[in-house]
């Protein structure tokens, strides 16, 4: 049996195992463990995948490469085709055209077992007991009953809802139900974890708890796909992204590289007093205002010093003046308007 | 296969462990037993006491014969059915006699009076005036007695010796026996009851378990857990596990009923005989092996057929209200088989009956009645089962396709055209 070099432990005596016994992926995992990660097949490869629902093209000739071990952000506004793409990766719906591979293999029910999924629309059997639901869902992913119960109990403890293990789901608060659903997604030690808007509806405390576990799993080698329309959230966590809009890919790649392409063409200014220095059409392309802070996109070739000089001349008090890479949100808007 | 089993087991366990299951398991037989006991009690209310009547013979010469015939009629327990308290022959004041008898009848002192008109021998119709024309059994024997009396009077008038007359007129009752495939004979009224009970049972369980399947599919859809499920299991496995799981619940319920029915059969019969009036017909729901085999086969075929349709509806709609609407056509198919009951009962082997019992959506209920009433030729049973099986497979196939697409679609219920498009899509 192969075990991860560093495990994620919901409890000290509980070792996170990637696999249970022999498995079709053991060869590729062995490579991962021995550091030959470059030779690993991608976690997800999509080639020219399309899906049409009656009159609308939900996904249009989408190409995608997600390498193993990535923390990948799938971004786009509501209705862009994110959920449809995820569903096709999980073989919940079949693409009309194109091919999809998970860990280098065409989709099969064994590939499904390697994926953990937290859907955007959460739901559990309301009248079943928490532990029974988890054991059932774990079983559907190939865990045996006692194993599923033991691991589920450990995760319930980690998420501090173990007192509710024998309660019916309907008696749990919404936040607790979300935690249970998250456990269902990770219980079977998936190699690919797909989280669709994982922080929606969670209070900050629980969101942090879920985020920590997600990062821990990622640290242990699990590939994570994070789907969201909240750009700023994904920007902080993901190493690579794909932006989609109306079913088409707008932009993808390693986040740092994407940003580098755009260069440090934005200035973040924290100030108080006179804001007239922002009215310089020769230097400023547009301004994002957040109250006391503004993000100023400079015209190509414009000098940021010009902006600072003007502010000082105007007597504006500057607390912070920083050249930054453009926020993902701006890149997205720019890309989408380019297409339009 | 393993996942299908998990789905089946969850469906089964969560349904059997509910109060609803326990209640319905107890309530249905309780209701059936209740109805049977009620019928026995009502049957027991049939005349057990001698009815006091008066006879008015306007022409004369008939009254005595009628009186004798009436007093020969016996109740099931052996006592006389009628006692003629007054016999008025050729009354002078017809109106006064009628008035006094009418008032006696109205107060209940008299069960009723028989009025034999002057023209009776020439075919004039006698009348029986009573507050309670009620029970067919009473009227049947009353009718017979009056007829016999009149015939005797006529014969005597034409010169037959009165001494032989009662002997000559002695009638009998015809006992109807039925020829079954096993060569046995049974009381036909009882087979009727057994056939109807079986058909109703089949109808009820197809309806209940079909709707249960629909609800179960819809519940997974509305709670959205289906998203997680189909990321782990193929939709077909999910659908099959669900339908089989609900079937297992149904079979469990039937097993409980059959076993307890077996245990209580002897005891129940004793109780029934005690409750029922002496001589009353105690329903004997004897079922032959062939009938039982057919019952199981038609339950299986019918259940899978209707459960598949109900499941597709559960998957296509997004709310319980929509489901109520969309399920109507399917439920009508089931109700239709009950509405067509009469055709079979009138003549189980008429061309209409044979044709109806071949139509897959009706055959589970209608063929079971035919089998219960009068074993149809085996080829007819075979053909109807084959048609049922083929239809069921086709419907299961279509339903699986609708299910696969429907469970991930939310919002407005799809139109029939849309559902047909789903059928065609890969």
Image (cartoon, rainbow, N blue to C red):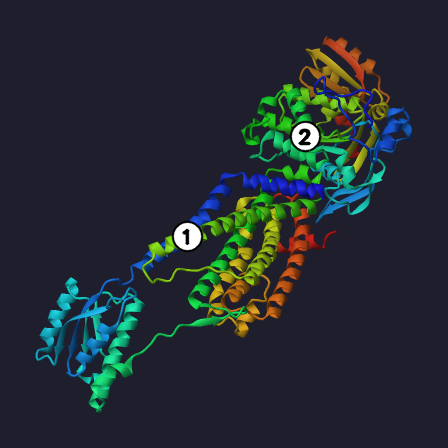
Q: Give x and y (percent) for residue A83.
A: 71, 37
Classify residue B185 as left or right of residue A141.
Answer: left
Residue B125 location, quadrant: bottom left
> Do pointers 2 and 1 mark residues of a single chain?
no
In the rendered view, would you say B388 is above or below B54? above
Q: Secondary structure at mark 1?
A: helix
Q: Nearer the viewer, residue B243 or A49?
A: B243
Classify residue A70 as left or right of residue B8.
Answer: right
Q: What residue appears at the point 69 percent right and 26 percent down from the top-left corner?
A: A151
Structural crowding at the residue carrying mark 2, measured as other residues with C-alpha within 10 Å and reported as few (<14), some (14–19) or many (≥20)? few
Q: Give x and y (percent) for residue A296.
A: 76, 20
In the rendered view, would you say A14 is above or below B135? above
Q: Nearer the viewer, residue B160 or B398?
A: B160
Q: Nearer the viewer, mark 2 or mark 1?
A: 1
In the rendered view, would you say B374 is above or below A68? below
Mark 1 — on which chain does it sit? B
For marks 2 and 1, give the CA distance. Answer: 46 Å
Q: Which mark is residue A146?
A: 2
Q: Give x and y (percent) for residue A318.
A: 73, 9
Q: Is residue A333 visible?
A: no
Q: Which mark is residue A129?
A: none
Q: What residue appears at the point 39 percent right and 60 percent down from the top-left corner?
A: B282
**Residue bearing the label numbered 1:** B268
Q: Quadrant of the C terminus of chain A?
A: top right
């Amino acid at each position: 049996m192969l075990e991860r070099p560093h495990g994620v432990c919901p409890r000290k005596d509980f070792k996170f195992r990637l696999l249970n016994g022999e498995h079709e992926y053991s060869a590729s995992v062995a490579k991962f463990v021995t550091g030959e990660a470059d030779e690993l097949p991608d976690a997800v490869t999509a080639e020219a995948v399309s899906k049409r629902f009656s009159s609308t093209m939900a996904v249009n000739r989408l190409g995608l490469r997600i390498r193993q071990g990535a923390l990948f952000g799938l971004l786009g506004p509501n209705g862009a085709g994110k959920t449809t793409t995820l569903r096709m990766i999980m073989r919940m719906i079949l693409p009309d055209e194109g091919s999809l591979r998970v860990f280098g293999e065409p989709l099969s029910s064994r590939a499904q077992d390697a994926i953990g999924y937290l859907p955007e629309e959460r739901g559990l059997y309301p009248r079943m007991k928490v532990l029974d639901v988890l054991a059932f869902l774990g079983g559907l992913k190939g865990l045996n009953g006692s194993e599923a119960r033991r691991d589920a109990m450990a995760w319930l403890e980690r998420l501090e809802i173990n007192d509710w293990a024998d309660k019916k789901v309907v008696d749990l608060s919404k936040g607790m139900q979300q935690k249970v659903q998250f456990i269902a997604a990770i219980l079977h030690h998936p190699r690919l974890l797909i989280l669709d808007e994982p922080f929606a509806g969670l209070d900050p405390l629980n969101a942090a708890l879920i985020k920590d576990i997600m990062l821990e799993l990622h640290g242990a080698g699990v590939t994570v796909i994070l789907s969201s329309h909240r750009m700023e959230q994904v920007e902080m966590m993901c190493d690579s992204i794909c932006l989609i809009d109306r079913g088409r890919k707008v932009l993808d790649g390693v986040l740092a590289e994407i940003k580098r392409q755009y260069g440090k063409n934005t200035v973040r200014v924290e100030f108080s007093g006179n804001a007239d220095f922002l009215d310089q059409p020769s230097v400023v392309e547009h301004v994002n205002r957040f109250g006391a802070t503004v993000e100023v996109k400079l015209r190509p070739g414009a000098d940021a010093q010009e902006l600072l000089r003007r502010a000082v001349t105007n007597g504006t008090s500057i607390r912070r003046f920083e050249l930054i890479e453009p926020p993902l949100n701006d890149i997205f808007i720019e890309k989408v308007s380019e297409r339009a | 296969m393993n996942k299908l089993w998990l789905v089946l087991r969850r469906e089964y366990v969560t349904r059997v462990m509910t109060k609803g299951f326990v209640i319905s398991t107890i309530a249905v037989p309780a209701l059936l037993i209740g109805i049977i006991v009620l019928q026995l009690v009502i049957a027991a209310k049939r005349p057990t006491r001698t009815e006091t009547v008066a006879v008015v013979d306007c022409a004369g010469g008939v009254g005595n014969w009628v009186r004798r015939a009436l007093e020969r009629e016996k109740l099931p327990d052996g006592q006389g059915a009628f006692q003629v308290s007054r016999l008025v022959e050729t009354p002078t004041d017809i109106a006064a006699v009628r008035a006094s008898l009418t008032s006696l009848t109205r107060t209940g002192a008299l069960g009723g009076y028989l009025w034999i008109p002057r023209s009776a021998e020439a075919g004039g119709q006698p009348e029986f005036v009573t507050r309670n024309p009620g029970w067919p059994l009473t009227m049947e024997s009353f009718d017979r007695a009056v007829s016999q009396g009149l015939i005797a009077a006529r014969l005597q008038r034409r010169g037959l010796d009165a001494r032989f007359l009662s002997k000559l007129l002695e009638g009998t009752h015809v006992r109807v026996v039925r020829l079954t495939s096993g060569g046995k004979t049974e009381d036909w009224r009882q087979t009727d009851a057994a056939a109807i009970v079986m058909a109703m049972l089949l109808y009820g369980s197809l309806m209940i378990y079909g709707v249960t399947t629909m609800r179960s599919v819809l519940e997974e859809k509305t709670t959205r857990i289906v998203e997680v499920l189909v990321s782990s299991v193929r939709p077909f496995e999910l659908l099959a596990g669900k339908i089989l799981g609900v079937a297992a619940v149904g079979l469990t319920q039937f097993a409980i009923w059959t076993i307890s029915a077996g245990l209580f059969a002897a005891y129940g019969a004793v109780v029934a005989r005690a409750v029922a009036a002496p001589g009353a017909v105690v329903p004997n729901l004897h079922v032959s092996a062939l009938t039982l085999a057919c019952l199981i086969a038609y339950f299986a075929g019918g259940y899978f057929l209707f459960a598949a349709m109900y499941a597709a509806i559960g998957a296509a709609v997004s709310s319980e209200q929509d489901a109520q609407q969309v399920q109507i056509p399917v439920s009508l198919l089931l109700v239709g088989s009950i509405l067509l009951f009469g055709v079979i009962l009138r003549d189980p082997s008429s061309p209409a009956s044979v044709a109806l019992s071949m139509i897959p959506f009706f055959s589970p209920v209608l063929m079971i009645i035919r089998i219960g009433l009068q074993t149809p030729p085996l080829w007819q049973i075979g053909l109807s089962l084959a048609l049922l099986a083929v239809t069921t497979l086709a419907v299961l196939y279509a339903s699986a396709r609708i299910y696969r697409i429907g469970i991930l679609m939310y919002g407005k219920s799809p139109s029939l055209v849309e559902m047909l498009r789903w059928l065609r899509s890969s």
